Amino acid sequence: MSRLGRVLVMLVCAFGALTAGAWRYALAADEAAPQIKEYKPNISAREYEKRYNAVYGKYTEQMAEEGNPADFMLDDGKDLFSKVEGSAGKSCASCHGANGEKLKGAAAGFPKYDPATKGINTVALQINRCREDHMGAAPLKYESYDQLALDLYVKSLSNGVPIKVSIDGPARPFYEAGKAYYYKRHGQFNFSCALCHVKYSGHMMRANLLSNNRHHADHWPSYRLKWAGTGSLQRRFRGCNKNVRQKPLPFECETYRDLQLYLTYQANGLPIQVPGFKM
Amino acid sequence: MPAVGRIKIRVPHSIARGQVIPVEVLVTHPMETGLRKGKDGKVIPAYFINNVDIYYGSDRITHCDWTIAVSANPFMTFYVKAEKAAPIKIVYKDNKGGVYEQAVQINPS
């Protein structure tokens, strides 16, 4: 064999080895693709608690105890619960008991997978579906006063019950979708939710302390001083989206419901406390 | 509907005669300053409570002049010496002529 031939054989062998390696690498990357690399918080939970108390103290808790303006909405929600509407001549109370006795603790399991729609069901969505299917009434517009009041009242029946959201079985892909959204970078500023609320939680962003996502989903609908009004978690999502210069999505769209499932799962085990009171 | 001028008054459950009690009052009001612009670029007209009167029985015990600096849905606490069985009445007046009032009965034992 000539010298040239030897070089050629060597080259072919080297190329083969290289491509085989590259192929193996590509396969490994494919397998790893659906797995999202989770961030680890930069600071410990104890350090976070310390910083939170240093910045906010107990001011919001104290203000909530003194008088939460959302209490008026809660009273209205109670009236709406027993108000007869629609063609069937029924109110929420005619199925669920006069003061919602049968709904005690029900909101702790929401959002959950619903086989009828093959999607995630939130309390707000469930109320509207109940109105259409069983009461024959028009669905309430999301984020309208009546809708929030009813949502608030139904959730307040489970006050103190620990959140118990299941992500097993059919709910799993929706949880993963919510997580993917949480870790995806959005908007002109190119921020993901997880960047602020997992990795850098406890750090200051100008005058604000970036909060940890553990307590994000247990107190909605909440009264918020910034809004000077009561709103839902999805209104907060929209606010966050606008903050990173992203176009906000509509209320109760599939993405927001998945995201709500993801966030509520982070709050598993915490008691529901509505109406909340936030900065 | 989100009503303006709903009032919630809180006083202690059991009151001794001569005791100084805190009275906590919450009222719903937008308290619009008149300095903000809406989405259409036009100035939102001022709409705020500027006059608060507090009565204990037939006496006016205090009076507040409020301005645009007070927050939306204002909350206030004041202290009263409970000497007689009489209602405490709070009257809010805003700059558009709205009058909102509510009373709570004080029965010192």
Image (cartoon, helix red, strand yellow):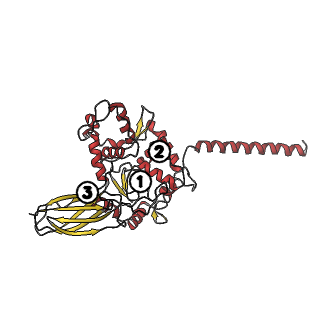
**Which residue has dot 1 on it?**
A214
User: In the shown orientation, is residue A72 left or right of residue B86?
Assistant: right
| Front label number (3 vs 2) | 3
**Residue A7 on image: x %, y %:** 85, 46
Asked if the residues shown at circle 1 and circle 3 are in contact, with their CB atoms under 8 angstroms apart, the answer is no
Residue A256, label in figure: 2
- Looking at the image, residue A223 lies above or below residue A135: below
User: In the shown orientation, is residue A11 left or right of residue B30?
Assistant: right
The chain that hosts pointer 2 is A
Amino acid type, callout 1: Arg
Asked if the residues shown at circle 3 and circle 2 are in contact, with their CB atoms under 8 angstroms apart, the answer is no
Give a yes or no on whether discs 1 and 3 share a subunit. Answer: no
The answer, for residue A157, to whether it is visible in the render is no
Amino acid type, callout 2: Tyr
Question: At x 29% / y 52%, what residue is drawn?
Answer: A71
The chain that hosts pointer 1 is A
Residue A34, label in figure: none
Between the C-alphas of marks 1 and 2, the distance is 18 Å
- Looking at the image, residue B53 lies above or below residue A88: below
Give a yes or no on whether discs 3 and 2 share a subunit. Answer: no
- Looking at the image, residue A130 lies above or below residue B98: above
